[in-house]
Amino acid sequence: MFLGLLTMGAHRTRQCSLLQLQPLRTCILFLLLLLLLLPCSASSSVITHLPGFHGRLRFYLETGYVSVDEETGTELFYYFVESERSPSTDPVILWLTGGPLCSGFTALVFEVGPMNFVLAPYNGSLPRLVNNQYSWTKIASIIFLDTPVGSGFSYARDPKGYNVGDISSSLQVVTFLKKWFNDHPSYLSNHFYVGGSSYAGKVIPLIAQYISEGIEQRQQPLIKLKGYMVGSPLTDPKYDRNSIIPYAHGVGIISDQLYEAAVANCKGDYVNPTNEICANVLNAVDNLMSELDNGDILLDKCAGRLIPKPINGVSSRALLEEYSRLSEPTARPTINCFSYRFYLLNIWMNDKATRDALKIKKGTVGVWTRCNTEVFPYARDVPSTIQYHLNLTTRGYRALVFCGDHDLMVPFLGTQAWIRSLNFTIIDDWRAWHLDGQAAGFTVMYDNNLTFATLKGSGHAPISYKPKQGFAMGQRWLDRKPL
Ligand SMILES: *[C@@H]1O[C@H](CO)[C@@H](O)[C@H](O)[C@H]1NC(C)=O
Ligand SMILES: *[C@@H]1O[C@H](CO)[C@@H](O)[C@H](O)[C@H]1NC(C)=O
Ligand SMILES: *[C@@H]1O[C@H](CO)[C@@H](O)[C@H](O)[C@H]1NC(C)=O
Ligand SMILES: *[C@@H]1O[C@H](CO)[C@@H](O)[C@H](O)[C@H]1NC(C)=O
Protein backbone atom coordinates (compact mmCIF):
# COMPACT_ATOMS: atom_id res chain seq x y z
CA MET A 1 0.00 0.00 0.00
CA PHE A 2 2.72 2.47 1.04
CA LEU A 3 4.80 1.50 -1.95
CA GLY A 4 1.77 2.10 -4.14
CA LEU A 5 1.41 5.59 -2.75
CA LEU A 6 5.04 6.31 -3.39
CA THR A 7 4.82 5.12 -6.96
CA MET A 8 1.77 7.22 -7.50
CA GLY A 9 3.49 10.27 -6.11
CA ALA A 10 6.37 9.78 -8.48
CA HIS A 11 4.00 9.81 -11.44
CA ARG A 12 2.09 12.91 -10.40
CA THR A 13 4.54 15.08 -12.23
CA ARG A 14 1.90 17.27 -13.78
CA GLN A 15 0.55 18.83 -10.64
CA CYS A 16 4.15 19.26 -9.59
CA SER A 17 5.15 21.12 -12.69
CA LEU A 18 2.58 23.78 -11.82
CA LEU A 19 4.82 24.63 -8.93
CA GLN A 20 8.06 24.35 -10.81
CA LEU A 21 9.34 27.69 -9.54
CA GLN A 22 8.67 26.85 -5.92
CA PRO A 23 11.18 25.00 -3.79
CA LEU A 24 11.16 21.24 -4.02
CA ARG A 25 9.82 21.03 -0.49
CA THR A 26 6.57 22.78 -1.46
CA CYS A 27 6.17 20.30 -4.24
CA ILE A 28 6.62 17.37 -1.89
CA LEU A 29 4.15 18.87 0.56
CA PHE A 30 1.70 19.43 -2.26
CA LEU A 31 2.07 15.81 -3.29
CA LEU A 32 1.50 14.56 0.23
CA LEU A 33 -1.62 16.69 0.45
CA LEU A 34 -2.83 15.25 -2.84
CA LEU A 35 -2.16 11.74 -1.59
CA LEU A 36 -4.40 12.36 1.38
CA LEU A 37 -7.19 13.73 -0.78
CA LEU A 38 -7.16 11.18 -3.56
CA PRO A 39 -8.30 7.58 -3.55
CA CYS A 40 -5.17 5.47 -3.38
CA SER A 41 -6.36 3.30 -6.26
CA ALA A 42 -5.66 5.95 -8.89
CA SER A 43 -2.31 6.22 -10.59
CA SER A 44 -1.43 8.26 -13.61
CA SER A 45 1.63 9.28 -15.59
CA VAL A 46 2.34 12.03 -18.07
CA ILE A 47 3.94 10.70 -21.25
CA THR A 48 6.11 13.05 -23.29
CA HIS A 49 7.80 10.62 -25.68
CA LEU A 50 6.76 7.40 -27.38
CA PRO A 51 8.93 4.85 -29.19
CA GLY A 52 8.53 5.19 -32.95
CA PHE A 53 7.36 8.81 -32.66
CA HIS A 54 10.01 11.39 -33.56
CA GLY A 55 10.64 13.95 -30.84
CA ARG A 56 8.44 15.18 -28.05
CA LEU A 57 4.70 14.57 -28.34
CA ARG A 58 2.92 17.69 -29.58
CA PHE A 59 -0.05 16.94 -27.32
CA TYR A 60 -0.54 16.31 -23.61
CA LEU A 61 -0.84 12.55 -23.05
CA GLU A 62 -1.57 10.95 -19.72
CA THR A 63 -2.05 7.26 -19.04
CA GLY A 64 -3.25 5.60 -15.88
CA TYR A 65 -5.25 3.02 -14.04
CA VAL A 66 -8.47 3.55 -12.12
CA SER A 67 -9.81 0.92 -9.76
CA VAL A 68 -13.47 0.16 -10.46
CA ASP A 69 -13.96 -2.91 -8.26
CA GLU A 70 -11.94 -3.43 -5.10
CA GLU A 71 -13.19 -6.96 -4.48
CA THR A 72 -11.82 -8.40 -7.73
CA GLY A 73 -8.98 -5.91 -8.07
CA THR A 74 -10.34 -4.62 -11.38
CA GLU A 75 -8.50 -1.65 -12.83
CA LEU A 76 -9.34 0.10 -16.08
CA PHE A 77 -6.51 1.59 -18.10
CA TYR A 78 -6.98 4.90 -19.91
CA TYR A 79 -5.17 7.26 -22.26
CA PHE A 80 -6.10 10.91 -21.86
CA VAL A 81 -5.26 13.45 -24.55
CA GLU A 82 -5.94 17.07 -23.76
CA SER A 83 -7.44 19.37 -26.38
CA GLU A 84 -4.78 21.18 -28.40
CA ARG A 85 -7.06 24.23 -28.68
CA SER A 86 -8.65 25.36 -25.43
CA PRO A 87 -8.69 22.64 -22.77
CA SER A 88 -10.57 24.81 -20.29
CA THR A 89 -13.56 25.37 -22.59
CA ASP A 90 -13.46 22.54 -25.17
CA PRO A 91 -15.66 19.52 -24.51
CA VAL A 92 -14.34 16.37 -22.86
CA ILE A 93 -15.23 13.16 -24.69
CA LEU A 94 -15.06 9.62 -23.39
CA TRP A 95 -14.33 7.61 -26.53
CA LEU A 96 -14.87 3.85 -26.52
CA THR A 97 -13.88 1.11 -28.95
CA GLY A 98 -16.09 -1.80 -29.98
CA GLY A 99 -15.54 -5.51 -30.13
CA PRO A 100 -16.61 -5.95 -27.39
CA LEU A 101 -13.15 -6.10 -25.81
CA CYS A 102 -11.12 -4.12 -28.32
CA SER A 103 -8.59 -1.70 -26.83
CA GLY A 104 -9.33 2.02 -26.59
CA PHE A 105 -5.93 2.60 -28.16
CA THR A 106 -7.41 1.49 -31.50
CA ALA A 107 -9.36 4.76 -31.58
CA LEU A 108 -6.33 6.79 -30.48
CA VAL A 109 -4.32 5.73 -33.55
CA PHE A 110 -6.98 4.85 -36.15
CA GLU A 111 -10.12 6.84 -35.42
CA VAL A 112 -10.28 10.19 -33.61
CA GLY A 113 -6.92 10.34 -31.82
CA PRO A 114 -3.77 12.40 -32.38
CA MET A 115 -1.53 9.78 -34.01
CA ASN A 116 -1.44 7.40 -36.97
CA PHE A 117 0.88 4.55 -37.83
CA VAL A 118 3.05 4.99 -40.90
CA LEU A 119 1.76 2.29 -43.23
CA ALA A 120 5.14 0.92 -44.34
CA PRO A 121 6.18 -2.73 -44.67
CA TYR A 122 7.47 -4.11 -41.38
CA ASN A 123 11.22 -4.64 -41.64
CA GLY A 124 12.12 -5.58 -38.08
CA SER A 125 12.32 -2.00 -36.78
CA LEU A 126 9.61 -0.67 -34.48
CA PRO A 127 6.64 0.65 -36.54
CA ARG A 128 6.60 4.45 -36.71
CA LEU A 129 3.95 6.93 -35.64
CA VAL A 130 3.14 10.41 -36.96
CA ASN A 131 0.64 13.14 -36.07
CA ASN A 132 -2.94 12.75 -37.31
CA GLN A 133 -4.00 16.04 -38.87
CA TYR A 134 -7.67 15.13 -38.45
CA SER A 135 -7.48 14.36 -34.75
CA TRP A 136 -10.56 15.32 -32.77
CA THR A 137 -8.16 16.35 -30.00
CA LYS A 138 -7.69 19.58 -31.98
CA ILE A 139 -11.13 20.57 -30.68
CA ALA A 140 -11.81 18.34 -27.66
CA SER A 141 -10.09 16.53 -24.82
CA ILE A 142 -10.54 12.79 -25.14
CA ILE A 143 -10.34 9.90 -22.70
CA PHE A 144 -9.66 6.63 -24.55
CA LEU A 145 -10.64 3.80 -22.25
CA ASP A 146 -9.78 0.10 -22.27
CA THR A 147 -13.21 -1.23 -21.34
CA PRO A 148 -14.63 -3.76 -20.51
CA VAL A 149 -11.98 -5.28 -18.26
CA GLY A 150 -9.96 -7.74 -20.36
CA SER A 151 -9.50 -5.28 -23.21
CA GLY A 152 -6.15 -3.61 -23.79
CA PHE A 153 -4.29 -3.13 -20.52
CA SER A 154 -7.30 -3.28 -18.20
CA TYR A 155 -7.12 -6.25 -15.87
CA ALA A 156 -8.55 -7.97 -12.81
CA ARG A 157 -6.45 -9.61 -10.09
CA ASP A 158 -9.24 -12.13 -9.47
CA PRO A 159 -10.31 -14.03 -12.64
CA LYS A 160 -13.92 -13.60 -11.49
CA GLY A 161 -13.46 -9.92 -12.29
CA TYR A 162 -13.62 -10.76 -16.01
CA ASN A 163 -17.24 -11.89 -15.72
CA VAL A 164 -18.83 -8.68 -16.91
CA GLY A 165 -21.49 -7.78 -19.46
CA ASP A 166 -23.24 -4.78 -21.00
CA ILE A 167 -24.76 -3.63 -17.72
CA SER A 168 -21.95 -4.34 -15.26
CA SER A 169 -19.21 -3.00 -17.55
CA SER A 170 -21.24 0.18 -18.20
CA LEU A 171 -21.61 0.71 -14.45
CA GLN A 172 -17.84 0.24 -14.11
CA VAL A 173 -17.31 2.93 -16.75
CA VAL A 174 -19.47 5.30 -14.68
CA THR A 175 -17.40 4.44 -11.58
CA PHE A 176 -14.29 5.09 -13.64
CA LEU A 177 -15.62 8.50 -14.72
CA LYS A 178 -16.50 9.57 -11.18
CA LYS A 179 -13.02 8.72 -9.94
CA TRP A 180 -11.35 10.22 -12.98
CA PHE A 181 -13.20 13.51 -12.56
CA ASN A 182 -12.45 13.55 -8.83
CA ASP A 183 -8.84 13.24 -9.85
CA HIS A 184 -9.16 15.89 -12.60
CA PRO A 185 -11.67 18.36 -11.11
CA SER A 186 -10.76 21.17 -13.51
CA TYR A 187 -12.57 19.30 -16.33
CA LEU A 188 -15.87 19.17 -14.45
CA SER A 189 -16.88 22.54 -15.87
CA ASN A 190 -16.50 21.31 -19.48
CA HIS A 191 -19.31 19.89 -21.55
CA PHE A 192 -19.10 16.13 -21.60
CA TYR A 193 -19.94 13.62 -24.34
CA VAL A 194 -19.62 9.87 -24.76
CA GLY A 195 -18.74 8.50 -28.20
CA GLY A 196 -17.63 5.42 -30.06
CA SER A 197 -18.41 2.98 -32.82
CA SER A 198 -19.63 -0.53 -33.41
CA TYR A 199 -20.15 -2.48 -30.18
CA ALA A 200 -19.36 0.70 -28.22
CA GLY A 201 -22.60 1.97 -29.73
CA LYS A 202 -24.34 -0.72 -27.72
CA VAL A 203 -23.04 0.38 -24.32
CA ILE A 204 -22.81 4.16 -24.87
CA PRO A 205 -26.58 4.68 -24.40
CA LEU A 206 -26.40 2.64 -21.17
CA ILE A 207 -23.46 4.63 -19.86
CA ALA A 208 -25.17 7.92 -20.78
CA GLN A 209 -28.38 6.74 -19.09
CA TYR A 210 -26.52 5.88 -15.86
CA ILE A 211 -24.69 9.23 -15.91
CA SER A 212 -27.99 11.04 -16.47
CA GLU A 213 -29.55 9.23 -13.51
CA GLY A 214 -26.60 10.38 -11.37
CA ILE A 215 -27.19 13.94 -12.57
CA GLU A 216 -30.89 13.73 -11.65
CA GLN A 217 -29.89 12.60 -8.16
CA ARG A 218 -27.33 15.44 -7.96
CA GLN A 219 -24.57 12.88 -7.35
CA GLN A 220 -21.07 14.27 -7.00
CA PRO A 221 -19.01 14.77 -9.04
CA LEU A 222 -21.65 16.35 -11.25
CA ILE A 223 -20.71 15.44 -14.83
CA LYS A 224 -21.91 17.93 -17.46
CA LEU A 225 -23.26 15.32 -19.88
CA LYS A 226 -24.63 17.01 -23.01
CA GLY A 227 -25.08 14.10 -25.36
CA TYR A 228 -23.52 11.17 -27.17
CA MET A 229 -22.24 10.00 -30.55
CA VAL A 230 -22.51 6.48 -31.93
CA GLY A 231 -21.03 5.20 -35.21
CA SER A 232 -22.38 2.06 -36.92
CA PRO A 233 -23.88 1.23 -33.52
CA LEU A 234 -25.13 -2.20 -32.57
CA THR A 235 -28.59 -1.43 -31.29
CA ASP A 236 -31.18 -4.16 -31.78
CA PRO A 237 -30.72 -7.36 -33.82
CA LYS A 238 -34.27 -7.05 -35.13
CA TYR A 239 -33.11 -3.97 -37.03
CA ASP A 240 -29.34 -4.41 -37.35
CA ARG A 241 -29.18 -7.98 -38.54
CA ASN A 242 -32.40 -7.99 -40.50
CA SER A 243 -31.09 -5.11 -42.60
CA ILE A 244 -28.14 -7.16 -43.85
CA ILE A 245 -30.20 -8.97 -46.52
CA PRO A 246 -31.94 -5.91 -48.00
CA TYR A 247 -28.59 -4.08 -47.98
CA ALA A 248 -26.75 -6.98 -49.63
CA HIS A 249 -29.48 -7.03 -52.25
CA GLY A 250 -29.40 -3.27 -52.79
CA VAL A 251 -25.65 -3.14 -53.43
CA GLY A 252 -25.62 -6.18 -55.70
CA ILE A 253 -24.14 -8.87 -53.47
CA ILE A 254 -27.14 -11.19 -53.75
CA SER A 255 -29.41 -11.76 -56.72
CA ASP A 256 -33.04 -10.68 -57.07
CA GLN A 257 -34.07 -14.34 -56.94
CA LEU A 258 -32.21 -15.05 -53.73
CA TYR A 259 -33.58 -11.90 -52.15
CA GLU A 260 -37.12 -12.80 -53.17
CA ALA A 261 -36.64 -16.31 -51.77
CA ALA A 262 -35.48 -14.81 -48.48
CA VAL A 263 -38.48 -12.47 -48.33
CA ALA A 264 -40.92 -15.27 -49.20
CA ASN A 265 -39.53 -17.91 -46.83
CA CYS A 266 -38.02 -16.16 -43.81
CA LYS A 267 -41.07 -14.05 -42.93
CA GLY A 268 -39.01 -10.99 -42.10
CA ASP A 269 -36.73 -12.82 -39.65
CA TYR A 270 -33.29 -13.35 -41.14
CA VAL A 271 -31.73 -14.09 -37.76
CA ASN A 272 -33.44 -17.26 -36.58
CA PRO A 273 -34.58 -19.31 -39.58
CA THR A 274 -37.75 -21.22 -38.72
CA ASN A 275 -37.81 -23.51 -41.77
CA GLU A 276 -35.33 -25.37 -43.96
CA ILE A 277 -35.86 -23.33 -47.11
CA CYS A 278 -35.12 -20.12 -45.21
CA ALA A 279 -32.02 -21.71 -43.63
CA ASN A 280 -30.77 -22.75 -47.08
CA VAL A 281 -31.38 -19.29 -48.50
CA LEU A 282 -29.46 -17.72 -45.60
CA ASN A 283 -26.59 -20.12 -46.17
CA ALA A 284 -26.42 -19.09 -49.81
CA VAL A 285 -26.42 -15.43 -48.71
CA ASP A 286 -23.66 -16.21 -46.23
CA ASN A 287 -21.49 -17.76 -48.92
CA LEU A 288 -21.83 -14.70 -51.14
CA MET A 289 -21.11 -12.35 -48.24
CA SER A 290 -18.01 -14.32 -47.33
CA GLU A 291 -16.44 -13.08 -50.60
CA LEU A 292 -16.16 -9.61 -49.08
CA ASP A 293 -14.73 -7.68 -46.17
CA ASN A 294 -18.01 -7.09 -44.38
CA GLY A 295 -16.59 -4.09 -42.56
CA ASP A 296 -16.16 -2.25 -45.88
CA ILE A 297 -17.42 -4.05 -48.93
CA LEU A 298 -15.09 -2.15 -51.28
CA LEU A 299 -11.85 -3.21 -49.60
CA ASP A 300 -9.76 -6.31 -50.17
CA LYS A 301 -10.81 -9.24 -48.04
CA CYS A 302 -7.86 -10.04 -45.82
CA ALA A 303 -6.62 -12.18 -42.99
CA GLY A 304 -6.76 -10.86 -39.49
CA ARG A 305 -10.09 -9.17 -39.72
CA LEU A 306 -13.69 -10.24 -39.55
CA ILE A 307 -12.98 -13.93 -39.49
CA PRO A 308 -16.39 -15.49 -40.00
CA LYS A 309 -17.34 -18.27 -37.66
CA PRO A 310 -20.72 -19.49 -38.86
CA ILE A 311 -23.05 -20.48 -36.04
CA ASN A 312 -26.39 -20.01 -37.66
CA GLY A 313 -25.69 -18.30 -40.90
CA VAL A 314 -25.88 -14.59 -41.28
CA SER A 315 -26.59 -13.91 -37.62
CA SER A 316 -23.15 -14.82 -36.34
CA ARG A 317 -21.37 -12.25 -38.46
CA ALA A 318 -22.75 -9.19 -36.82
CA LEU A 319 -21.88 -10.61 -33.43
CA LEU A 320 -18.27 -11.16 -34.26
CA GLU A 321 -17.73 -7.51 -34.92
CA GLU A 322 -14.11 -6.53 -34.98
CA TYR A 323 -12.94 -9.97 -33.98
CA SER A 324 -9.31 -10.26 -34.80
CA ARG A 325 -6.66 -12.91 -34.35
CA LEU A 326 -3.68 -10.81 -35.27
CA SER A 327 -1.43 -12.36 -32.69
CA GLU A 328 -1.56 -15.57 -34.71
CA PRO A 329 1.24 -15.73 -37.28
CA THR A 330 -1.05 -17.27 -39.93
CA ALA A 331 -3.25 -14.20 -39.82
CA ARG A 332 -0.47 -11.86 -40.98
CA PRO A 333 -2.08 -9.55 -43.53
CA THR A 334 -0.38 -8.10 -46.59
CA ILE A 335 0.25 -4.37 -46.86
CA ASN A 336 -2.70 -3.74 -49.18
CA CYS A 337 -5.01 -4.83 -46.35
CA PHE A 338 -6.85 -2.44 -44.07
CA SER A 339 -5.83 -4.75 -41.22
CA TYR A 340 -2.12 -4.21 -41.89
CA ARG A 341 -2.32 -1.24 -39.51
CA PHE A 342 -3.57 -3.58 -36.78
CA TYR A 343 -0.62 -5.88 -37.44
CA LEU A 344 1.79 -2.93 -36.99
CA LEU A 345 -0.04 -1.87 -33.85
CA ASN A 346 0.28 -5.31 -32.28
CA ILE A 347 4.03 -5.34 -32.91
CA TRP A 348 4.45 -1.83 -31.53
CA MET A 349 2.35 -2.42 -28.45
CA ASN A 350 4.12 -5.64 -27.47
CA ASP A 351 7.56 -4.05 -27.59
CA LYS A 352 9.10 -3.60 -24.15
CA ALA A 353 10.06 0.01 -24.90
CA THR A 354 6.44 0.88 -25.65
CA ARG A 355 5.11 -0.70 -22.50
CA ASP A 356 7.75 1.05 -20.41
CA ALA A 357 6.90 4.37 -22.03
CA LEU A 358 3.17 3.90 -21.39
CA LYS A 359 3.89 2.98 -17.75
CA ILE A 360 2.19 -0.39 -17.93
CA LYS A 361 2.19 -2.25 -14.61
CA LYS A 362 4.38 -5.34 -14.72
CA GLY A 363 2.68 -8.70 -14.43
CA THR A 364 -0.82 -7.49 -15.31
CA VAL A 365 -1.26 -8.22 -19.03
CA GLY A 366 0.81 -10.70 -21.04
CA VAL A 367 0.61 -10.36 -24.81
CA TRP A 368 -1.43 -7.30 -25.77
CA THR A 369 -4.00 -8.04 -28.44
CA ARG A 370 -6.06 -5.32 -30.07
CA CYS A 371 -9.26 -7.28 -29.53
CA ASN A 372 -9.91 -10.00 -26.97
CA THR A 373 -13.45 -10.55 -28.20
CA GLU A 374 -13.52 -14.31 -27.78
CA VAL A 375 -10.94 -14.54 -25.01
CA PHE A 376 -12.94 -13.36 -22.00
CA PRO A 377 -16.52 -14.09 -21.04
CA TYR A 378 -18.83 -11.21 -21.82
CA ALA A 379 -22.59 -11.14 -21.31
CA ARG A 380 -24.52 -9.34 -24.03
CA ASP A 381 -27.27 -8.79 -21.50
CA VAL A 382 -29.04 -5.82 -23.08
CA PRO A 383 -30.60 -7.09 -26.33
CA SER A 384 -31.89 -3.70 -27.46
CA THR A 385 -30.87 -0.15 -26.63
CA ILE A 386 -33.69 1.63 -28.50
CA GLN A 387 -35.43 2.45 -25.22
CA TYR A 388 -32.24 4.08 -23.94
CA HIS A 389 -31.94 6.25 -27.04
CA LEU A 390 -35.57 7.27 -26.58
CA ASN A 391 -35.02 8.03 -22.90
CA LEU A 392 -31.93 10.13 -23.46
CA THR A 393 -33.02 12.14 -26.47
CA THR A 394 -36.44 12.99 -25.05
CA ARG A 395 -34.76 14.27 -21.89
CA GLY A 396 -32.69 16.82 -23.83
CA TYR A 397 -29.45 14.97 -24.50
CA ARG A 398 -28.11 15.54 -28.00
CA ALA A 399 -27.39 12.51 -30.19
CA LEU A 400 -25.36 12.01 -33.35
CA VAL A 401 -25.83 8.64 -35.03
CA PHE A 402 -23.57 8.08 -38.02
CA CYS A 403 -22.99 5.21 -40.40
CA GLY A 404 -20.59 4.23 -43.16
CA ASP A 405 -22.69 3.54 -46.24
CA HIS A 406 -20.46 0.58 -47.24
CA ASP A 407 -20.80 -1.28 -43.95
CA LEU A 408 -22.34 -4.74 -44.31
CA MET A 409 -22.00 -5.63 -40.62
CA VAL A 410 -24.38 -3.03 -39.24
CA PRO A 411 -25.90 -1.60 -42.42
CA PHE A 412 -27.21 1.96 -42.24
CA LEU A 413 -30.62 0.68 -43.36
CA GLY A 414 -31.15 -0.94 -39.97
CA THR A 415 -29.92 2.13 -38.09
CA GLN A 416 -32.24 4.34 -40.12
CA ALA A 417 -35.13 1.96 -39.39
CA TRP A 418 -34.75 1.94 -35.58
CA ILE A 419 -34.41 5.71 -35.58
CA ARG A 420 -37.69 5.94 -37.50
CA SER A 421 -39.29 3.64 -34.94
CA LEU A 422 -38.88 6.46 -32.40
CA ASN A 423 -41.51 8.44 -34.37
CA PHE A 424 -39.65 11.75 -34.02
CA THR A 425 -40.60 14.63 -36.30
CA ILE A 426 -38.12 15.57 -39.02
CA ILE A 427 -36.72 19.08 -38.42
CA ASP A 428 -34.23 19.23 -41.30
CA ASP A 429 -35.11 16.86 -44.13
CA TRP A 430 -32.77 14.32 -45.73
CA ARG A 431 -30.08 16.12 -47.71
CA ALA A 432 -26.42 15.87 -48.63
CA TRP A 433 -23.85 17.38 -46.29
CA HIS A 434 -20.71 18.75 -47.92
CA LEU A 435 -16.99 19.13 -47.57
CA ASP A 436 -14.72 20.81 -50.13
CA GLY A 437 -17.68 21.25 -52.47
CA GLN A 438 -18.50 17.53 -52.51
CA ALA A 439 -21.16 15.46 -50.81
CA ALA A 440 -19.46 13.87 -47.80
CA GLY A 441 -22.59 11.91 -46.98
CA PHE A 442 -26.27 12.42 -46.28
CA THR A 443 -28.02 13.62 -43.16
CA VAL A 444 -31.42 14.13 -41.58
CA MET A 445 -32.19 15.89 -38.34
CA TYR A 446 -35.01 14.89 -36.05
CA ASP A 447 -36.78 16.52 -33.17
CA ASN A 448 -35.13 16.03 -29.75
CA ASN A 449 -31.75 16.98 -31.21
CA LEU A 450 -31.21 13.64 -32.90
CA THR A 451 -29.01 13.82 -36.00
CA PHE A 452 -28.45 10.91 -38.38
CA ALA A 453 -25.63 11.06 -40.93
CA THR A 454 -23.86 8.81 -43.36
CA LEU A 455 -20.21 9.01 -44.32
CA LYS A 456 -20.00 8.39 -48.05
CA GLY A 457 -17.74 5.51 -49.04
CA SER A 458 -17.03 4.53 -45.46
CA GLY A 459 -17.32 1.22 -43.61
CA HIS A 460 -17.78 -0.08 -40.08
CA ALA A 461 -16.23 2.28 -37.48
CA PRO A 462 -16.83 4.97 -40.12
CA ILE A 463 -14.35 7.67 -39.08
CA SER A 464 -11.33 5.40 -39.51
CA TYR A 465 -12.07 5.15 -43.26
CA LYS A 466 -12.84 8.84 -43.81
CA PRO A 467 -10.87 10.79 -41.20
CA LYS A 468 -11.18 14.18 -42.90
CA GLN A 469 -14.95 13.94 -43.37
CA GLY A 470 -15.32 12.36 -39.94
CA PHE A 471 -13.52 15.28 -38.33
CA ALA A 472 -15.69 17.82 -40.18
CA MET A 473 -18.82 15.98 -39.05
CA GLY A 474 -17.68 15.85 -35.41
CA GLN A 475 -16.57 19.47 -35.33
CA ARG A 476 -19.83 20.78 -36.78
CA TRP A 477 -21.93 18.67 -34.45
CA LEU A 478 -19.92 19.57 -31.34
CA ASP A 479 -20.15 23.24 -32.36
CA ARG A 480 -23.96 22.79 -32.65
CA LYS A 481 -23.87 23.73 -36.32
CA PRO A 482 -25.83 21.89 -39.00
CA LEU A 483 -23.69 19.29 -40.77
C1 LIG B 1 13.38 -0.20 -41.58
O1 LIG B 1 12.95 0.93 -42.31
C2 LIG B 1 13.15 2.16 -41.66
C3 LIG B 1 12.49 3.26 -42.49
O2 LIG B 1 12.79 3.15 -43.83
C4 LIG B 1 14.62 2.40 -41.43
O3 LIG B 1 14.84 3.63 -40.77
C5 LIG B 1 15.17 1.25 -40.60
O4 LIG B 1 16.56 1.38 -40.44
C6 LIG B 1 14.86 -0.09 -41.25
N1 LIG B 1 15.25 -1.14 -40.34
C7 LIG B 1 15.92 -2.22 -40.72
C8 LIG B 1 16.23 -3.23 -39.63
O5 LIG B 1 16.27 -2.38 -41.86
C1 LIG C 1 -35.85 5.52 -18.77
O1 LIG C 1 -35.77 6.60 -17.83
C2 LIG C 1 -36.49 6.40 -16.65
C3 LIG C 1 -36.34 7.66 -15.82
O2 LIG C 1 -35.00 8.00 -15.66
C4 LIG C 1 -36.00 5.15 -15.94
O3 LIG C 1 -36.79 4.90 -14.81
C5 LIG C 1 -36.03 3.95 -16.88
O4 LIG C 1 -35.45 2.84 -16.24
C6 LIG C 1 -35.28 4.28 -18.13
N1 LIG C 1 -35.31 3.17 -19.06
C7 LIG C 1 -34.20 2.69 -19.59
C8 LIG C 1 -34.35 1.55 -20.52
O5 LIG C 1 -33.12 3.13 -19.34
C1 LIG D 1 -44.31 4.74 -33.09
O1 LIG D 1 -45.54 4.61 -33.77
C2 LIG D 1 -45.97 3.26 -33.94
C3 LIG D 1 -47.22 3.28 -34.82
O2 LIG D 1 -48.14 4.21 -34.36
C4 LIG D 1 -46.22 2.65 -32.56
O3 LIG D 1 -46.61 1.31 -32.70
C5 LIG D 1 -44.94 2.74 -31.74
O4 LIG D 1 -45.16 2.27 -30.42
C6 LIG D 1 -44.42 4.15 -31.69
N1 LIG D 1 -43.10 4.16 -31.05
C7 LIG D 1 -42.79 4.92 -30.02
C8 LIG D 1 -41.41 4.82 -29.51
O5 LIG D 1 -43.59 5.69 -29.52
C1 LIG E 1 -31.76 20.82 -28.34
O1 LIG E 1 -30.59 21.32 -27.74
C2 LIG E 1 -30.65 22.68 -27.40
C3 LIG E 1 -29.32 23.07 -26.87
O2 LIG E 1 -28.40 22.92 -27.89
C4 LIG E 1 -31.74 22.89 -26.37
O3 LIG E 1 -31.84 24.27 -26.06
C5 LIG E 1 -33.03 22.38 -26.90
O4 LIG E 1 -34.02 22.46 -25.89
C6 LIG E 1 -32.92 20.95 -27.37
N1 LIG E 1 -34.13 20.54 -28.02
C7 LIG E 1 -34.84 19.52 -27.60
C8 LIG E 1 -36.10 19.27 -28.35
O5 LIG E 1 -34.50 18.82 -26.67
Image: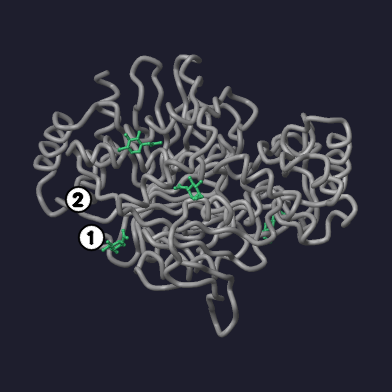
In space, the residues marked 1 and 2 are separated at their CA atoms by 8 Å
Residue occupying image coordinates x 83% and y 60% = 252
Q: Name the foreground residue: 62 vs 148.
A: 148
Whether residue 61 is visible to the viewer of this picture, yes or no, is: no
Label tally: 2
Quadrant for residue 57, please give it.
bottom left
Residue occupying image coordinates x 54% and y 25% = 379
Q: Is mark 2 within 8 Å of ligand 4?
A: no
Quadrant for residue 264, please give it.
top right
Residue 333 percent across, percent down from the top left: 77, 48
Q: Name the foreground residue: 356 vs 245.
A: 245
Q: Give the residue at mark 2.
A: 186
Q: Name the foreground residue: 251 vs 194.
A: 251
Q: Give the residue at mark 1.
A: 88
Residue occupying image coordinates x 40% and y 60% = 137
Tell me if 37 is positioned left or right of 154 in this view. left
Q: Quarter of the image for the N terminus: give it.
A: top left
Residue occupying image coordinates x 22% and y 28% = 39
Residue 29 percent across, percent down from the top left: 10, 36
Disc 1 residue type? Answer: Ser
Tell me if 106 is positioned left or right of 185 in this view. right
- Circles 1 and 2: CB atoms closer than 8 Å: yes
- In this view, which residue lies farthest toward the bottom? 437
Secondary structure at badge 2 equals helix
Q: Is mark 1 within 8 Å of ligand 4?
A: no
Q: Residues within 10 Å of mark 1 (few under 14, many from 20)?
A: some
- Relative to 294, residue 314 above or below: above
Q: Residues within 10 Å of mark 2 (few under 14, many from 20)?
A: few
Secondary structure at badge 1 equals loop
Tell me if 386 is positioned left or right of 245 in this view. left
Disc 2 residue type? Answer: Ser
